[in-house]
Amino acid sequence: QVQLVESGGGLVQAGGSLRLACAASRGTLFWYAMGWFRQAPGKEREFVSSITRSGASTRYADSVKGRFTISRDDNLNTVYLQMDSLKPEDTAVYYCAGHEGTGLFTWDSQYDYWGQGTQVTVSS
């Protein structure tokens, strides 16, 4: 069982950048495919990005493709989401999630473990 903790959220102006981190405070991420989701006020949680266990393959939502980059460092037991060219519509609580096994998963029901979320606010 793994416990996930996100960090790196904050307030940034449109066009700016943030890097989110998802660390395993208990257990190891080595066995998990990982994903990032977000939930804006009044909206359903939506897929942002995912990465396989090896890190060789990634997937992105169309809304963030070309602006966000997911990566992982298993030595540091951490998954990252680099967010560039941020827009006000990127404002949301961002969650990382883990799926035991490998693959690229886009549905939140496919994930077994979740972090508590970190707030990202992009001002115009």
Image: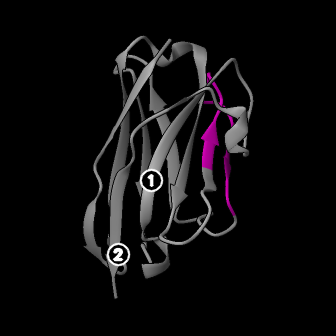
Q: In this view, does 36 lie to the left or right of 33?
A: left
Q: Residues within 10 Å of mark 1 (few under 14, many from 20)?
A: many
Of all residues shown, which one is farthest toward the front?
A: 42
Quarter that holds the C terminus: bottom left
Part of the protein shown in magenta: 49-61
Residue at horizontal 35%, vertical 63%? 120
In this rendering, is residue 15 above or below 47?
A: below
Of all residues shown, which one is farthest toward the left?
A: 11
Residue at horizontal 42%, vertical 80%? 88
Compare marks 2 and 1 and give the one earlier in the sequence: 1
Residue at horizontal 69%, vertical 17%? 101
The image quarter containing residue 18 is bottom left
Q: In this view, does 56 lie to the left or right of 82?
A: right
Q: Name the residue under label 1.
A: 94
Rendered location of residue 123, percent (x, y) = 31, 82
Q: Mark 2 points at which residue?
A: 122
What amino acid type should be assigned to the residue bearing mark 1? Tyr
Rendered location of residue 85, percent (x, y) = 43, 73
In this rendering, is residue 124 above or below 22?
A: below
What amino acid type should be assigned to the residue bearing mark 2? Val
The image quarter containing residue 106 is top right
Q: Looking at the rendered structure, which numbered label has been put on residue 36? A: none
| Number of residue marks | 2
Q: In this view, does 70 lie to the left or right of 44?
A: left
